Amino acid sequence: MNAHEVIEKVIAEHGHIDDIFWVACGGSLIDLYPAHYMVLRESKIASGWHTAAEFTCDVPARLGEHSLVVVCSHSGNTREAVEAATLAHERGAAVIALTDSKGSKIDQDDFIVWVYPWGDGVPTAEVPLGICPMIAAEVIRAQEGFEAYDALVDGIAKMDGIIEAGKQKVNAELGARFAELCQNHDFLYILGSGPNFCQTYGFAICSLMEMQWQNCSYINSAEYFHGPFECTENGVFYFLQLSAGSTRAIDERALAFLKTHTDTLMVLDAKDYGMDAVDASVRSYLEPALFYAMNVELRAARGKVFDHDPDMRRYMGIETY
Amino acid sequence: MNAHEVIEKVIAEHGHIDDIFWVACGGSLIDLYPAHYMVLRESKIASGWHTAAEFTCDVPARLGEHSLVVVCSHSGNTREAVEAATLAHERGAAVIALTDSKGSKIDQDDFIVWVYPWGDGVPTAEVPLGICPMIAAEVIRAQEGFEAYDALVDGIAKMDGIIEAGKQKVNAELGARFAELCQNHDFLYILGSGPNFCQTYGFAICSLMEMQWQNCSYINSAEYFHGPFECTENGVFYFLQLSAGSTRAIDERALAFLKTHTDTLMVLDAKDYGMDAVDASVRSYLEPALFYAMNVELRAARGKVFDHDPDMRRYMGIETY
């Protein structure tokens, strides 16, 4: 599949796109957020980001034939995601269904089904964190022009090298420390901002709650000063995901406070992990791919020390719910 | 002030409104969410909900002379909120600034300043959780017609009685239990969905983290099954805010799982608290006012047992940050 051709077809069939809705659950929803944020900031197209059950339950009034709905279900069988895609199609919207699983329930003729590969060594360009910004960029370029288009293509190509180098660095510098901090703290706060807030949330709900049964919470660095910082004191564990992008100043404000108000702070600075190589105009939209990969390393490091394989589940896909 | 007259003036000056942006920080941001959700579901007007620092840093491309920006700062002196209002005005948008504080920094001639009263006995209609749905309703009615308008006005009028009765009920049934559960658990998860997710977040970051220095996390009930539920087991404390509105089925699914997977569950069912008296077409948009009031009672109950006055701060408004 190729975002340019897909969007050409969508626009040919739907005339023009007024809205993009990004709809999924959990880890797949997380992957759609940077592209949503990009549309808000770069384009006159309206954009919405919805957990699938709420989208189906409280259908946005703007949903219709000039809407593009991007639904992602990694397994392809997530009930809420399939229902959302079906509803969107019934309302006349163009539906792109991203999935890792050909032949799954979401693999239907009513949708433009984009099956993506998954696993070690798959390039960023081929997974949702790379595909979705390109889908957005193609719609924006076709309808309004998009100055940062070439920078985005270039940035996506650079991410694989950045991530590969980052894996070694994060394991050497933070892996053991993170696992040890988890041994000594039942709970942690994860902070981040901008498009990368999806990985702040994602590290919490997927990597830690789901894959490590580790209690934690996630806070937008901008919101930290409007309540959550009152919990900060020595012994309370914070992990700050420091953006190298447009919201860096927001994270730096949190960093300055955390440094002087807790003795248990871990920082992952995307600037130290090579994100400077990506043009500033698109850096924010791509750094979630770096943070995601680092989250994977950190959960693996914790998993080893706790003898808790990140692939182990007790409920998901096992029980009925 | 009166939402009808304010919106008449806004539309007279700006021709028509294509976007409403709801912009604030922390507790004030929380209060804007139900109106944002209502616009998405009920109207062709685009709607965005933004923490103020991100709004100013990554300005939405649609912001302009046909935008209405509703900024709320309770103190009127929140730097990020004032900056966001100023930016929005410079971009030609209509700016309504809600504040409790006349003469504060946000009380400027460039904005339509709406000073609201605060404290025990102030009707829902006069505080942001009542004002904002009416602002949204007036814009929708003026531009598209709004069938649920009368139901909304009627519902807001009913909220004060519902809340008053709710205070007694929640104190009798849940107050002591909540405080005791907090004594026996260092951490809890709060779950909710739909417009009320703002009070799920708000109970976490304002009532508990800020006002009780109580560590906790907040989870959308729809997202619970896509990661967070793997943490659930006996001894892990969950508080479910069960909606009486459009997303009730989402919360009920979480309830069914929680009931059989943890022995430490507290439920506040809005249906048992009288929300049935409000028409189903607008119930979701108003029940956050009930949940907010119940959060206030629960934090007070905890505060007494812990001898921690909810008005006590160690950093906010005390240190420089």
Image (cartoon, coloured by chain):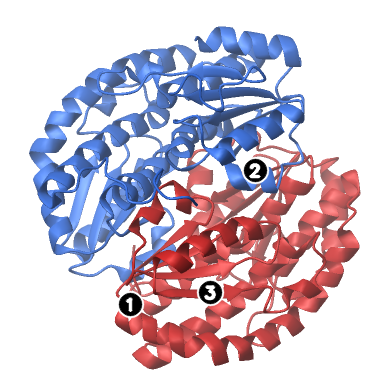
Chain colours: A blue, B red
In percent of the image, x 33 and y 77: which residue is there? B314
In percent of the image, x 50 and y 38: which residue is there? B58
- Residue A317 placement (x, y as % from top left): 41, 43
Mark 3 is on which residue type? Val
Single out the mark in the foreground, 1 or 2. 2
Does residue A318 appear anywhere in the picture? yes
What residue does disc 3 label? Answer: B267
Q: Secondary structure at mark 1?
A: loop
Single out the mark in the foreground, 1 or 3. 3
- Residue B64 placement (x, y as % from top left): 69, 37
What residue does disc 1 label? Answer: B314
Marks 1 & 2 on one chain: no
Single out the mark in the foreground, 2 or 3. 3
Does residue B26 appear anywhere in the picture? no
In this image, B251 relative to B162: left or right? left
Q: Secondary structure at mark 3?
A: strand
Of A16 and A258, nearer the camera is A16
In percent of the image, x 10 and y 40: which residue is there? A173
Mark 2 is on which residue type? Phe
Subunit ID for the residue under disc 1: B
Mark 1 is on which residue type? Arg
Compute the Cα span from label 1 to label 2: 40 Å
Residues packed near mark 3 inside 10 Å, few (<14), some (14 to 19) or many (20 plus): some
Q: Which mark is residue A55?
A: 2
Q: Secondary structure at mark 2?
A: helix
Q: Residue B274: which quarter of the image?
A: bottom right
Q: Is residue A73 above or below residue B311?
A: above
Q: Is residue A62 above or below residue A261?
A: above
Of A205 and A172, nearer the camera is A205
